[in-house]
Amino acid sequence: MIREEEIILHMLNDFCHHQSSEWFHELDKDSYDQDKLVNILIAQGLGGLASYQLYNKSHLLIQPKILNHMFLQDVFMSVNQADLLKEMTTYFEEEKIPFICMKGSVVRDSYPEPSLRNMGDIDIVIHYEDRFKVDHIMMDLMGCKKMVDNHSVWTYNIKFLTVEVHNHMFYEKLSNDFDYIGYFDGVWDHIKNAEVFGVSSPYLYVPEENYHFLYLMVHTAKHIINKGYGFRAFIDMVMYTKKNELDWDYLKKELKNIKLLSFTQVCFAFCERWFGVTMPLSVPLDEKFYQEISAKVIRDGLFGLENEDNIGAAEAKVYKQGKGSYFVTMLDHIRRRLFPPYEEMQLIPWYKFVDGRPWLLPAAWVYRWGYCLVKKKDESMDKLLRPYKAKDKIEERIGYINHWGL
């Protein structure tokens, strides 16, 4: 582990124990690369948190100024997101639209200073039948611009703020054989009223603590299977389990039911090693796997990057979901890339003309083939042939998923 990574983990260890990191100011400046340290923190979305850890009146001027700027930016975003949610809630109340806040807007209250848990958008869940009312509120009354409409997620933007409106809490198949979409469609049976960003309303809900924890683990698994996840997801686990009185007997049983017990145990083991905390569920970690994942988390940044580590991630996920041999599964994967189904094509902006007109699907395929051949032939051929050209990388990725307990 390089020096900069050691410093970051020491800092995060302090944060999880509610201790400041004043030792940082005594470090020999030649013992680490400040630019490299700052770049890692920015990529991990932890610049503001690091500034909070390093704050000391006598040393404020010698900490990297960009970290202090990121702290102020996080606070600024938090204040504006609170105002946005307050305005939304007023309109939702008038129209009697119930909605559920989830993810960062809920987890942030587990942090010693909520604005330290920065978030790029506000995620809410609504009933599908309320989507037109919500559309009217967001666009006509609040002046937002709709950025995405894919029949299940509507993304609205106003200035520098973003709101994602969902009618499902979860959307994807993971690498194990369980219906997470159907499971989390039951969220409306597991909600309670609570303040979010200091805003409360009889129409504003959050998931019950145990249920939301299960969702956080599924959401983490999704990112790790797809491309990767940064340290923040694991800090969330520590903060959330410390702040809330969770029923671990129930959770252990439910995690086993949804096929994520082994994964959660591995995640908690990393939390213990990285942050020096004691977690309720944990297992011994293979030392080689620990070293590899620690380095990968650093390289991946907050949400996973397109890098050497993640070559074959999509194919490995497909194989884990498949029932047949590698050859048969990958052949079917190539077929789906050549002939994507209507359910996928209708959501892609360039092929919107098929939405509601499935008979136009062949025309969309031809258009897609032509565009790929003319505009990005090499990239398209690489993706098409990757199951065979990068078989070793894909098999390595499959082993990586298995090690995570997925």
Image (tube, rainbow, N blue to C red):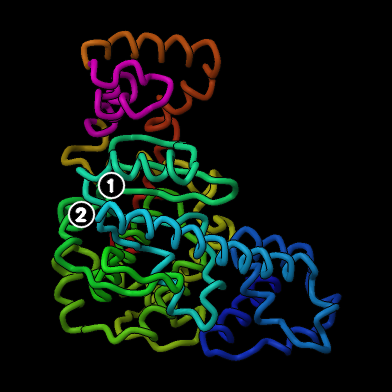
**Residue 365 sits above or below residue 290 on the image:** above
**Residue 57 spot, x, y in % from top left:** 79, 88
Quadrant of the image containing the N terminus:
bottom right
| Three-letter code for the amino acid on which mark 2 is drawn | Tyr
Tell me the magenta residue range. Answer: 328-357
- Give the number of the disc on residue 200: none
Mark 2 crowdedness (10 Å alpha carbons): few <14, some 14-19, many ≥20: some
Determine the main secondary structure of the stretch shown in magenta: helix
**Residue 211 spot, x, y in % from top left:** 23, 70
| Three-letter code for the amino acid on which mark 1 is drawn | Glu
Dot 2 lies on which element? helix
Pick whichever, 218 or 72, lies toward us.
72
**Residue 59 spot, x, y in % from top left:** 82, 85
| Residue at position x 32%, y 8% in the image | 363
Pick whichever, 214 or 206, lies toward us.
206
Relative side of 237 to 188, left or right: right
Return the residue found at the far front.
Answer: 94
| Residue at position x 34%, y 16% in the image | 353
From this viewpoint, is residue 233 visible? yes
Relative side of 280 to 22, left or right: left
Query: Would you say residue 351 sits in the magenta stretch?
Result: yes
Determine which residue is flagged by label 2: 180
Dot 1 lies on which element? loop
**Residue 319 spot, x, y in % from top left:** 27, 42
| Residue at position x 72%, y 83% in the image | 55
- CB contact under 8 Å: marks 1 and 2: yes
Pick whichever, 252 or 189, lies toward us.
189
Mark 1 crowdedness (10 Å alpha carbons): few <14, some 14-19, many ≥20: few
- Give the number of the disc on residue 172: 1
Query: Would you say residue 165 sits in the magenta stretch?
Result: no
